[in-house]
Image (tube, helix red, strand yellow):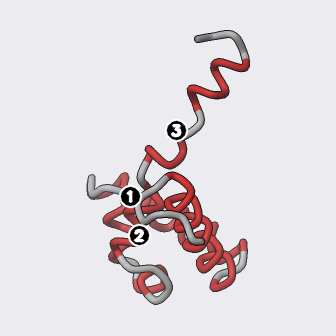
Amino acid sequence: MPPALGSKSSRAQEHATLLSRLRNALDTCQTCRIGVRNAGRNEDDGAGFLAMLAADPEVAAHLSRAELEALADPQYYLTYVDTAFARLGLL
């Protein structure tokens, strides 16, 4: 049975799927070029990096704004921080 929508495992699968789509669509050189180009634009005009990526036609051809926002959600990357800290004896 698939995980419940919104559950941690469902969210992890969603992120893995989105990252896989981006990796399959673009090679490493393209990804780096897009990142550098948009990071530079971000510094020049003060817009957020996510907004720059969403406005980039090369990125928008592969991921929607909602998909980019899901990838940028820090909660996904912090899911197991308590477990890691507990294993290290820091909690």
Seen as rendered, the residue at the extreme left is 46
C-alpha distance separating marks 1 and 2: 6 Å
Instruction: Say which label, 3 or 2, has the lower sequence index.
Output: 2
Q: Position of residue 11 (x, y in %)?
A: 50, 59
Do labels 3 and 2 touch, CB within 8 Å?
A: no
65 or 33: nearer the viewer: 65
- As drawn, 80 above or below 33: above
Q: What residue is shown with label 3?
A: 78
Q: What residue is shown with label 2?
A: 53
Q: Residue 49 carries which label?
A: 1
- As drawn, 41 above or below 63: above
Kind of element beneath mark 3: loop
Kind of element beneath mark 2: helix
Residue type pointed to by label 1:
Phe
Instruction: Say which label, 1 or 3, has the lower sequence index.
Output: 1
Is the N terminus in the top left, top right, bottom left or bottom right quadrant? Answer: bottom right
Density class for disc 2 (Cα within 10 Å; few <14, some 14-19, many ≥20) is many
Residue type pointed to by label 3:
Leu
80 or 59: nearer the viewer: 80
Q: Residue at x 71, y 74 (%)?
A: 29
- As drawn, 23 above or below 78: below
Q: Which residue is drawn at 53% across and 40% down?
A: 79
Q: Residue at x 42, y 65 (%)?
A: 5
